[in-house]
Each structure stands twice: as structure tokens, then as C-alpha cells.
Amino acid sequence: MVKIFKNKSAISEDFDDEVLGDLMSLRQYPKLLASIPRLTSYYKAMAEKSERYKKNSLVTKIIQVKDSAEVTKLLAEMDAMKYNPALYSLYTKQLRQIKTAEELVLMRKTIEISALAHREAMKAIKPDMSELELQGVQEFIHKKLGAEYVGYPSIAGAGANGCVLHYIENNATSIGNNKMILMDIGAEYHGYSADITRTFPSNGKFTPEQKQIYDIVIDAQEAVFKICKEGTSFEEIEKAARDVVAKGLVKLGILKDESESRTYFPHGCSHFLGLDVHDKGIYDKLLENMIVTVEPGIYIPEGSKCDKKWWGIAVRVEDDVLIKKDKLEILSSSAPRKTEDVEKVAAQKSFVDNLSADLKK
């Protein structure tokens, strides 16, 4: 089907929108032109490893560019083609950013599956469990409830591992006492991906320091929820979350100045969600029936320039929300968010509690 579509649309068979997106970003954000050497070396390495990239004509051209003038020339060549890659990219973004009624049914399903899996992990967690065990609990629930895959590589980062933004090794053999685990895990159901993150304590109770950091993240989320409706810009979302995090960290003495917030909140707050975990869309203003994430976070690695009592604390709380005309709907509400609700669920029994003992019988 993809091949037929490309032929009818006069799109070259080796067209790759991901590669095009990297190139187009250089036009959209001129400051990135300084990263040309890194871009060319990345695609050179990928071409050596993958036939997909090796045979891609655009990759070949990117590898050969040496400066911004050659990038500008390459972009002009593409604009002059019968098939305009930039327009194709724009059209697909417009199509995928607004969810149809049928898509909303599938999105609600995959998000609910994922939320229930997070809830079960909260019940199951014990200090002596491994990261992989807790990942397995969630992914079992996915399969039990009908999801075919995970939407992206699962993240289960215990303690300081949670400070690594895309930590996917999940090989720590023990979460540890008085530690938290950051779990960024979402199901994929019939091609549609959820994206939910919860952070919760190994022994079911937050320490005072963990709770203080966690509550700042929740307050940042709440600030975004208040403005999430049609017409709000992604820039406004980012500012709302970052302002709360910055003020909170200054109040605790972790930051000296609010302008330093990226030290401990280094990523964006929201992205589109759908057929891909980072789905296509135009990052301008929210429109009705968009689904986006709201995911503020605070990560304080070992050795940070603050009191040691904060070291190793990592918190991200991520929810999937449906944008409406004058409000939002939190689709992932089945996964507890606030500390008191997390602790309440963590005190409940899980289906895995006696599993090890039963297997040994």
C-alpha cells in the first residue's frame, strides 16, 4: 500500500520523512546549521549499518554536504522537484494532528490499557524487585488487555537511573529501599501508541524530599492543565510548566536563579501522540481533537550543585490529554498521579505478590 501511495503521489520510492524532517529543521531553525558536521556523520554511520539509509538518495546527498551553502542548495533542489517534500511533510502533519472519531476510540483503548498497567506496577513494587521485573508486570498487563506491542522501548529507571532521560537498559537487579522508580511505558494497540510516565516509591511511601520534588512536578502539570484548550500555544504550555518548576526549585534552594531551570528540567513539556509516540503535527496552537502529552519532570543527578539530600531524585509525571474547545480531558486518569493516591494504590495487593513462592512449590 505504501508503494502504491508513493507511485500515485509521484514520491520517490526511497522517500523517508524522518530524514526529510532532519533536513527541514535546518531551514526552520537556522541556528542548527552549526550541527551540519554532526548530521552528516550521523547519517554516514547509519548508512554503514542499515540498507534503508544506504539506499536512500537523500541520505547520500546529506552525507556529501559540507556547509550551510550546500544545505541551502539541496533544499532548493527539493523545492524545485515535481513532488515537493516540504508540502508532503506539511500535509501529513495536518492530517495526523487531528484525531477522527475512529482514531479516538483506539487512542482511548491504548491509553487505558497503559494506565491500568502503571496502576498494577504500583501495587507490585517492592525494594528488592529488579527494574526488569517491574517492566514485565506492565507489559504483561498490556498483552492481557489486548495490546500487540509497546509503543516505544520501555523505561524503568530506579533511583539515579531515572535521571537518564532515555534509559532503556532496565538492568538494575534491585530498585533499593527508599528509592523511586521512573516508569515511562506505553502500549501500542492496533497501531496507536500511548505514552504515560509515573514515578513511585519502592516501599510505597515517599520520603519528605521525594514528596517535595514530586509535588513541584504535579503543580507544573496542574498549571498546564488549566490552560490546555483550543487556542493555547505550545509555547504557553512550555512556559507554564517551566515557571512552576523554576520557582519550586529556587524555593527549595536547589536552584539559585529561575533562569537555570533547564539544569534539572532539560526537555520539552508536550508532544503529539497517535500513530507514533512522537506523532506528526504542527507545533503552533492547540486545536480540538488533538491528543498531546503533558510531561514536566525534575532530574537531580549524583554530584549536582545542590544539597546531597536531593541527589538521585528523578521525577516525571506524564499524562495523555485530549484537547477540546474550552478544556481538556485527561485520558490517562486511571493511573494515580498525586502522592496520596499513589501511596494508597501501592498499599494494595498485586497478582504477582505470591508468584515467586507459588513457582517454587
Image (cartoon, rainbow, N blue to C red):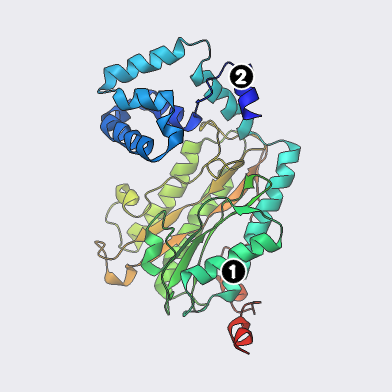
Closer to the camera in the image, 19 or 86: 19
Image point (48%, 11%), residue name: 81
Image point (47%, 33%), residue name: 18
Q: Disc 1 marks which amino acid?
A: Val
Image point (39%, 71%), residue name: 209
Q: CA distance from mark 1 to mark 2?
A: 44 Å
Looking at the picture, does residue 351 appear above or below residue 35? below
Which quadrant holds the C terminus?
A: bottom right
> Which badge, 1 or 2, is on the more N-terminal residue?
2
Can residue 331 be seen by looking at this rendering? no
Q: Would residue 352 appear left or right of 183 to someone viewing this image?
A: right
Circle 2 packing at 10 Å, graded few (<14), some (14-19), many (20+), is: few
Residue 247 placed where, x, y %?
Answer: 38, 54
Q: Would residue 105 appear left or right of 321 to someone viewing this image?
A: right
For residue 37, which numbered disc appears in the image?
Answer: none
Tell me whether circle 1 and circle 2 mark residues in contact (CB < 8 Å): no
Q: Disc 2 marks which amino acid?
A: Asn
Which quadrant holds the N terminus?
A: top right
Looking at the picture, does residue 122 appear above or below residue 322? below
Q: Secondary structure at mark 2?
A: helix
Looking at the picture, does residue 77 appear above or below residue 223? above
Total number of numbered discs in the rendering: 2
Q: Which residue is mark 2?
A: 7
Residue 107 placed where, x, y %?
Answer: 68, 46
Q: Would residue 210 appear left or right of 294 to someone viewing this image?
A: left
Q: Secondary structure at mark 1?
A: helix
Residue 166 placed where, x, y %?
Answer: 42, 54
Q: Which residue is mark 1?
A: 137
